[in-house]
């Protein structure tokens, strides 16, 4: 809820932007005509598929007292039109002004927060979540914004869903969320910066202390057109105001571009996961994980940084999670958190719910829950887990009903190539019979591959626990943090993490 402190004169603000408008007192701004109320100003801008100005009549009918509309040409800037009881103020270049306008409206909330922005093709969500959890463990009131939604971290993440389903909310929502956090005495915010958001200037006026770059690989070419344009979009993170540190990935080629585009006076901190201690050290600060040993319930590695060196244990699984952990650690150390305190948080931090989340079983094989539900994600998860077991790697998986049937044999191949023992189960069968989906999956397997069909997911997990050796590792792929199964047209409660917690208790009796 926007609180009274935000009620201010829009007029004062518009004067800053060279527009002389009548005095209008409002509580907020919105880009969406459907959300308009008399207390909100509707901001009508041209979009990719639609023109917000076409929704002005709807905003008026919902009681908008004021509308800011994108001007078609510079000469129209500051023009004022009255339609019924509503004042429409035209502004030239309004789309690009949105972040500045909203920042001013909400009184520059980012200036009152410690802010960390994370970009990169993979790992954004995990790094943001790790930073958030670690800052919480260090005793700070910490919030995050990203693919999982937005909110303050308490003992677990309970977030409001992402605005419009976007990883990075629109320019107005970003400032609004930050202002809400300020109101709630938050000290630290970490947010994901998608390449779309950077190109569309959703973050332009967000004072950002630290920028973290994870990695760059092919993605979103439908939107950006070429790898060059995509890489350039990511680099726009370096243009955000207030940056004092940029965290770069020594293992990723694209970091060289980042290093050469880093502004004067901005400190570079390099992160890496290396097989053995680094022979040469980068210029600037660094935060390296070396000699990583992978166990059934986590990793042990040597943490070698410009702030100190020690051996640490974490219950995160997978090489890429150690890379994510280094990014988070580097950001925290750059903020001035004490080395020994940060090390303690590395040892306490938990995996993001349903993302290579390990559940320990004393007498049985450990179980890992992961959201992997595409062939590539399944391949990556199995590849990561292979290092964590000397025994067999089990894979429990399925495919959705009423969806792309071509995916079924591909999932089978990914499982067959990455795992030693396969169990096909149900994963949102919808209107199809689980047996039909299983048969399609089997169609992608080598006939000699040993595979079991157990449509009931819980029975499938029990089967693996009973048959796997204590050194084996069992991956339950597909459900992750979700808490339902769609069977027929019913959405049935099913939380795999709760099922496993129950089985853990049963097994410990
Ligand atoms: C291509 C793109 O980025 N589109 C974003 C953009 O929408 P748009 O410009 O197409 O909006 P539009 O539908 O043309 O509408 C134009 C204007 O009319 C307004 N409108 C529209 C309908 C209506 O009834 N009333 C109304 O007022 C809209 O609020 C908007 O201001 O602005 C919207 C509001 O900020 C975003 O929600 C929308 O994201 C869409 C949903 C999207 O799919 N975006 C993807 C590509 C994206 O941004 N993805 C990245 C993550 C990528 C990743 O790393 O995985 C992200 O940050 O989420």
Image (tube, rainbow, N blue to C red):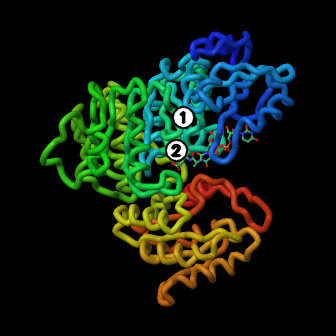
Give whichever of 52, 138 is nearer the camera. Answer: 52
Residue, far left? 279
Residue located at (67% from left, 14% from top): 10
Residue located at (73% from left, 25% from top): 67
Residue, far front? 75
In this picture, residue 251 sits left or right of residue 189: left
Q: Is residue 257 above or below residue 405?
A: above
Q: Position of residue 224 (x, y in %)?
A: 48, 51
Q: Position of residue 476 (x, y in %)?
A: 54, 64
Q: Position of residue 400 (x, y in %)?
A: 65, 68
In this picture, residue 154 sits left or right of residue 29: left
Label 2 lies in ligand 1 vicinity (Cβ under 8 Å)? yes
Label 1 lies in ligand 1 vicinity (Cβ under 8 Å)? yes
Residue located at (48% from left, 56% from top): 221
Q: Residues within 10 Å of mark 1 (few under 14, many from 20)?
A: many
Residue hosting label 2: 196
Q: Is residue 29 above or below residue 304?
A: above
Give whichever of 316, 242 is nearer the camera. Answer: 242
Secondary structure under tag 1 reads: loop
Which quadrant of the structure image shows residue 496?
Answer: bottom right
Mark 2–mark 1 Cα distance, whole angstroms, equals: 9 Å
In this picture, residue 19 sits left or right of residue 225: right
Disc sitting over residue 48 in the figure: none
Residue hosting label 1: 202
Q: In terms of sequence position, does the residue under pointer 2 or pointer 1 come before the other?
A: 2
Q: Residues within 10 Å of mark 2 (few under 14, many from 20)?
A: some
Q: Position of residue 507 (x, y in %)?
A: 55, 60
């Amino acid at each position: 809820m926007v609180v009274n402190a935000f009620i201010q004169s829009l007029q004062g603000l518009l004067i800053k932007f060279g527009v002389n408008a009548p005095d209008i007192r409002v509580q907020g701004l919105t880009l969406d005509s459907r959300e308009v109320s008399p207390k909100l100003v509707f901001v009508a801008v041209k979009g990719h598929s639609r023109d917000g100005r076409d929704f002005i009549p709807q905003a008026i009918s919902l009681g908008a007292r004021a509308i800011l509309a994108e001007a078609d040409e510079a000469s129209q800037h500051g023009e004022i039109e009255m339609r019924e009881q509503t004042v429409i103020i035209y502004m030239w270049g309004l789309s690009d002004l949105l972040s500045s306008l909203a920042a001013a409206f909400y009184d520059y909330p980012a200036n009152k927060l410690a802010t960390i922005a994370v970009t990169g093709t993979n790992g954004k969500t995990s790094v943001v979540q790790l930073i958030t959890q670690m800052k919480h463990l260090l005793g700070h009131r910490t919030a995050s914004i990203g693919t999982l939604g937005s909110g303050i971290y308490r003992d677990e993440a309970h977030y409001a869903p992402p605005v419009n389903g976007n990883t990075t909310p629109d320019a107005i929502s970003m400032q609004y969320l930050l202002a809400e956090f300020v109101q709630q005495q938050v000290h630290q915010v970490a947010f994901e910066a998608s390449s779309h958001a950077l190109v569309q200037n959703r973050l332009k006026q967000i004072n950002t202390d630290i920028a973290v770059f994870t990695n760059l690989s092919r993605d979103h070419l439908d939107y950006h057109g070429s790898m060059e344009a995509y890489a350039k979009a990511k680099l726009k993170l370096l243009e955000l105001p207030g940056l004092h540190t940029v965290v770069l990935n020594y293992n990723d080629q694209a970091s060289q571009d980042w290093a050469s585009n880093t502004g004067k006076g901005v400190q570079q901190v390099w992160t890496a996961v290396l097989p053995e201690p680094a022979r040469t050290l980068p210029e600037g600060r660094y935060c390296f994980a070396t000699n990583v040993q992978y166990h059934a319930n986590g990793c042990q590695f040597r943490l070698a940084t410009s702030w100190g060196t020690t051996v640490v244990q974490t219950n995160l699984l997978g090489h890429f999670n150690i890379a994510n952990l280094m990014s988070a650690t580097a950001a925290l150390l750059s903020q001035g958190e004490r080395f020994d305190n940060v090390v303690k948080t590395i040892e306490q931090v938990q995996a993001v719910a349903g993302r290579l989340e390990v559940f320990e079983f004393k007498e049985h094989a450990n179980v890992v829950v992961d959201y992997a539900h595409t062939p590539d994600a399944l391949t990556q998860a199995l590849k990561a887990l292979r290092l964590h077991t000397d025994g067999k790697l089990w894979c429990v998986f399925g495919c959705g009903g009423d969806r792309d049937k071509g995916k079924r044999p591909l999932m089978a191949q990914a499982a067959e190539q990455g795992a030693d023992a396969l169990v096909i189960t149900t994963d949102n069968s919808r209107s199809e019979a689980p047996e039909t989906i299983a048969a399609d999956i089997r169609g992608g397997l080598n006939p000699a591959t040993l595979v079991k069909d157990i449509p009931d997911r819980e029975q499938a997990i029990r089967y693996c626990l009973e048959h796997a050796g204590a050194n084996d590792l069992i991956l339950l792929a597909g459900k992750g943090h979700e808490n339902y199964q769609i069977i027929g047209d019913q959405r049935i409660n099913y939380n795999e993490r709760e099922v496993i917690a129950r089985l853990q208790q049963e097994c410990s009796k």
